[in-house]
Image (tube, grey):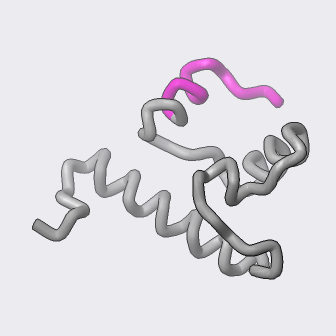
Amino acid sequence: MHVVRQTISKWEKGLSVPDADLLIRIAEIFETTVSTLLGDTVEPSEDKNIIAQKLEQLNTLLAEKKDGVDVSGK
């Protein structure tokens, strides 16, 4: 899959997530859904736009966490 271990380490630490195309490939390899990989419950009937929106939200939260922004609203 051409992913270096440093990248995987960032995923494991919650500092980043794979891009959508890579998530789809990983899900196919493990015969699961992208939503399962992300720890979310997405109904199979939900379309790709909803999954893309959830990925965007996750990436925003990770970016805010990285920049030290309090994402809890406190």
Q: Residue at x 74, y 56 (%)?
A: 34
Chief secondary structure of the magenta span? helix
- 43, 56: nearer the viewer: 43
The answer to whether residue 49 is above or below residue 56 is: below
The answer to whether residue 31 is above or below residue 33 is: above
- 33, 61: nearer the viewer: 33
Picture coordinates of residue 71, whole percent (x, y): 24, 62
Picture coordinates of residue 59, whole percent (x, y): 48, 58
The answer to whether residue 5 is above or below residue 44 is: above
Picture coordinates of residue 51, whole percent (x, y): 67, 71
Indicate the quadrant containing the C terminus: top left, top right, bottom left or bottom right: bottom left
6 is within the stretch colored magenta: yes
Q: Residue at x 21, y 64 (%)?
A: 72
Picture coordinates of residue 43, whole percent (x, y): 73, 74
Q: Residue at x 75, y 80 (%)?
A: 46
Q: Is residue 60 left or right of residue 41?
A: left
Q: In the rendered structure, which segment of residues is drawn in magenta?
A: 1-10
Which residue is outermost to the top?
5
Q: Is residue 30 left or right of residue 16?
A: right
